Image (cartoon, rainbow, N blue to C red):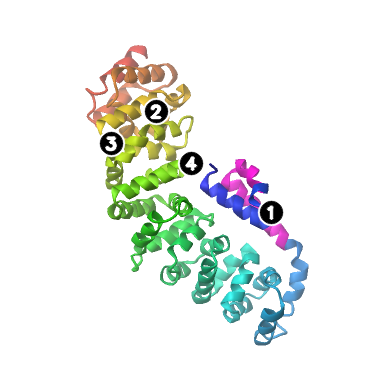
């Protein structure tokens, strides 16, 4: 399956071009970052093409009072035209644009919102009072127009984020809209407010996700996996404290079945130690241990490896034995990378705890490969092992490395 963020950017690109999703699906190979840049570039050029016309319209703004023009506009001008013209008005007459926003009916403003220049949305978010923006967001969510609502959240100021917590009650709509906001920084700021705010919103929001559809669950994963490590840790702590193990297992099964393993691993890798322990003791982790290991074969992405090794290192010995055996079966090039990954991501501890549960033939396999293809210093490895007090359990690994080195 396409990466969740990449898919969201494809949906936005298709909407910008007014074509079916299938027409742009082949562009998924560009990745989320390039698709986002492409969509922003195309959107900007489309609006800039009509800039002279919109600027002429904008020149009338200082002449005709809004109290006279806006009632007429709402009766006779299509929202498509008003939304597109609003960009020029917003750039040249910022105060007038904010005043107009407060005078428009919520329904008409929501009709116009899909046609706004995204650059104008950010400006409105900076200048406008939160109340009318929140009303428009709520109307967009009522219509389930999550693609349009997403940019409003992406440009949210701290004041607007606080207003979202208090004024946007639709948990599902909030999650689905945030999935279309590209910036992980902005998403993280919103989720942080929901974690720290007085409304105690996150437990309710997580319950909505657990009880929701597959699509909602995937949207939530896309949102949470892009948050900063501290936010993921806090959200995870609430999730594991409030959801029963069966619900956690059901979520994980949904994500793996939908091909969202990478996003899941990015989330799992940033869980707090107590949450990781709860995850490790959940029966589902034993069921999927070998699948998680297989998912990172050939990958050098530290975030993915962290999501595999951190939870598996805390599992019972039998699970660690199977996970270690599966590690040994990965492509030789992947096995060669492991010491460098463990060093770069400070994952020696988790890796060694997994290997400590393996049989001697598995340890010998790692020792042989690392001796032949890496510069791993046996003394350094032995110090790492001693730090974990695993000397006796990893004797075959260290002996093989020393003999063959």
Side of 299 where 319 appears, left or right: left
Q: Which region of the structure is painted magenta? A: 24-47
Q: Which residue was labeled with disc 3? A: 315
Q: CA distance from mark 2 to mark 3?
A: 21 Å
Q: Position of residue 244 (x, y in %)?
A: 29, 51
Q: Secondary structure at mark 1?
A: loop
Of the two numbered discs 1 and 4 on the same chain, state the one appearing first in sequence: 1
Packing grade of label 3 (10 A; few <14, some 14-19, many >=20) is many
Q: Which residue was labeled with disc 2? A: 339
Side of 287 where 147 appears, left or right: right
Q: Position of residue 226 (x, y in %)?
A: 46, 50
Quick check: 105 above or below 277?
Answer: below
Q: CA distance from mark 4 to mark 2?
A: 28 Å
Packing grade of label 4 (10 A; few <14, some 14-19, many >=20) is some
Quick check: 34 above or below 95?
Answer: above
Q: Secondary structure at mark 4?
A: loop
**Residue 33 in magenta?**
yes
């Amino acid at each position: 399956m396409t990466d969740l963020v990449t898919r969201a950017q494809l949906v936005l690109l298709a909407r910008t071009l007014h074509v079916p999703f299938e027409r742009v699906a082949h562009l998924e190979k560009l990745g989320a970052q390039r698709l986002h840049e492409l969509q922003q570039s195309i959107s900007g050029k489309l609006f800039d093409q009509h800039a002279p016309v919109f600027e002429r319209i904008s020149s009338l703004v200082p002449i005709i009072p809004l109290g006279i023009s806006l009632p007429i506009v709402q009766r006779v001008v299509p929202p498509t035209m008003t939304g597109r013209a609003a960009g020029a008005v917003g750039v040249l007459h910022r105060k007038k644009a904010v005043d107009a926003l407060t005078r428009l009916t919520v329904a008409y403003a929501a009709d116009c919102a899909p046609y706004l220049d995204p650059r104008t949305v950010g400006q409105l978010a900076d200048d406008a009072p939160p109340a009318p923006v929140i009303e428009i967001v709520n109307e967009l969510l009522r219509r389930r127009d999550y693609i349009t609502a997403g940019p409003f959240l992406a440009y949210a100021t701290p004041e607007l984020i606080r207003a979202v917590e208090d004024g946007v009650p639709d948990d599902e709509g909030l999650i689905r809209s945030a999935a279309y906001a590209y910036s992980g920084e902005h998403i993280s700021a919103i989720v942080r407010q929901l974690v720290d705010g007085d409304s105690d919103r996150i437990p309710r929001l997580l319950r909505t996700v657990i009880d929701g559809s597959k699509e909602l669950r995937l949207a939530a994963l896309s949102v949470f996996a892009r948050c900063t490590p501290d936010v993921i840790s806090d959200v995870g702590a609430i999730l594991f404290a409030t959801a029963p193990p069966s619900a956690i297992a059901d979520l994980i099964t949904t994500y793996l079945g939908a091909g969202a393993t990478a996003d899941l691993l990015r989330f799992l890798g940033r869980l707090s130690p107590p949450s990781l322990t709860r995850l490790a003791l959940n029966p589902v982790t034993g069921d999927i241990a070998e699948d998680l290991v297989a998912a990172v074969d050939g990958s050098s992405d530290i975030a993915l490896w962290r999501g595999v090794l951190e939870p598996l290192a805390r599992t019972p010995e039998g699970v660690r034995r199977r996970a270690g055996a599966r590690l040994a079966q990965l492509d030789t090039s992947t096995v060669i990378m492991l010491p460098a990954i463990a060093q770069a991501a400070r994952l020696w501890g988790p890796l060694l705890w997994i290997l400590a549960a393996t049989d001697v033939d598995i340890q010998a396999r790692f020792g042989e490969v690392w001796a032949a293809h890496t510069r791993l210093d046996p003394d350094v490895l032995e110090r790492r092992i001693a730090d974990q007090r695993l000397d006796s359990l990893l004797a075959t690994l260290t002996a093989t490395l020393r003999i063959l080195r």
